[in-house]
Image (cartoon, rainbow, N blue to C red):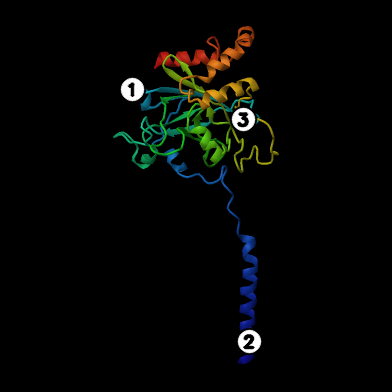
Amino acid sequence: MMSNYLSSLTIICLLAFSSCEAQPTHQKKDKAPVGGNCETCELMFEGIPDKIRSSDTSAGWYENTQKLIVTGRVFQSDGKTPAPNILIYYWHTDAKGLYSSKPSSHSKAAQHGYLRGWVKSDSNGNYMIHTLRPAPYPKEDIPAHIHLLIKEPTIANPYYVDDLVFDEDPLLIKHLKKYPAEERGGNGILRVLLHGKVQVAEHDIILGLNIPNHPATKDLPKESGLSIGQDNLPLSLIMLMGPIREAGLVRFVNTDVIMASYFIPVINQIGHPLSSGSGFWNKVQSSIRIH
């Protein structure tokens, strides 16, 4: 009896040991999502329309406040090839810095407020957003910003890119010193131009750029130098802008006036992508007339 008991116990122990040893080979580690963890990303799909165009207009465009157009192109990871059919979801605060709701707001996405929408890049990668200019959070040192999420057709999950912020925002420099930009998808600092009473900014998005676990760029080495969309200003302009900003005149002096005065000879000779005769401005002018 005892020998049978010991034999049975030995068999049980061997089976248990072999089972424990074999267990890790059957367990697969969860694959890290592209872009890493993304808080509230799931709200991107709440209330999403059946048909999404390359241009979208939020309810804020029709309010009596500062109008803003953000337009640009989406490129593949090489920064040159247009990326069509890329879904972009945006949301931002209202003119008081709040994610306020309206009766028509989608209840499950209430924390994103009513100023939200979707665009899908066209065959040339173009997109355009008409909205109001957001205000910073009340009583906080965070600059005004627009959140962007990207959903690529070949990637299972959406991921966030850098928030869009405004170059003349007095809160921006201090914030960037404390929280340097990740430059996910490119540089998110918007240089705002005025077209009549409408503020216009151009922002291109590079798929996979500085996005963790992105299949197009995960094996690429880190590169030095300026990020895509980042300005390389001449030293004379940098020296000039310092005193202007320190004097608190940045709210009244558009940096592009200084840029234009510096580059006028070049602009007159070869044209400028933001000049009145360019495709960029023609597109903006047509958009404003339509709206």
- Mark-to-mark CA distance, 2 and 3: 66 Å
- The mark nearer the N terminus, 2 or 1, is 2
Nearer to us in this view, 108 or 148:
148
Residue 35 visible to an observer of this rendering: yes
| Neighbours of disc 1 within 10 Å: few (<14), some (14-19), many (20+) | few
Q: Which mark is residue 64?
A: 1
Q: CA distance from mark 2 to mark 1?
A: 87 Å
Instruction: Pinpoint residue 186: horizontal percent, then vertical percent.
Output: 59, 32
**Looking at this view, is 162 or 259 the one in front?**
259
Q: Tag 3: Cα neighbours inside 10 Å, few (<14), some, or many (≥20)?
A: some
Which residue is painted at 61% across and 13% down in the image? 263
Q: Residue at x 50, y 12 (%)?
A: 282
Amino acid type at image mark 2: Leu
Q: Quadrant of the C terminus?
A: top left
Mark 1 against mark 3, which lies toward the viewer? 1
Q: Which of the labelled discs sits on residue 248, or is there none? A: none
Residue designated by label 3: 76
Structural crowding at the residue carrying mark 2, measured as other residues with C-alpha within 10 Å and reported as few (<14), some (14–19) or many (≥20): few
Q: Is residue 268 above or below residue 70?
A: above
Vertical order, 67 against 42 (above or below): above
- The residue mark sitting in front, 2 or 1, is 1
Q: Which residue is mark 2?
A: 6
Q: Nearer the viewer, mark 2 or mark 3?
A: 3
| Percent x, y of residue 245 | 52, 26
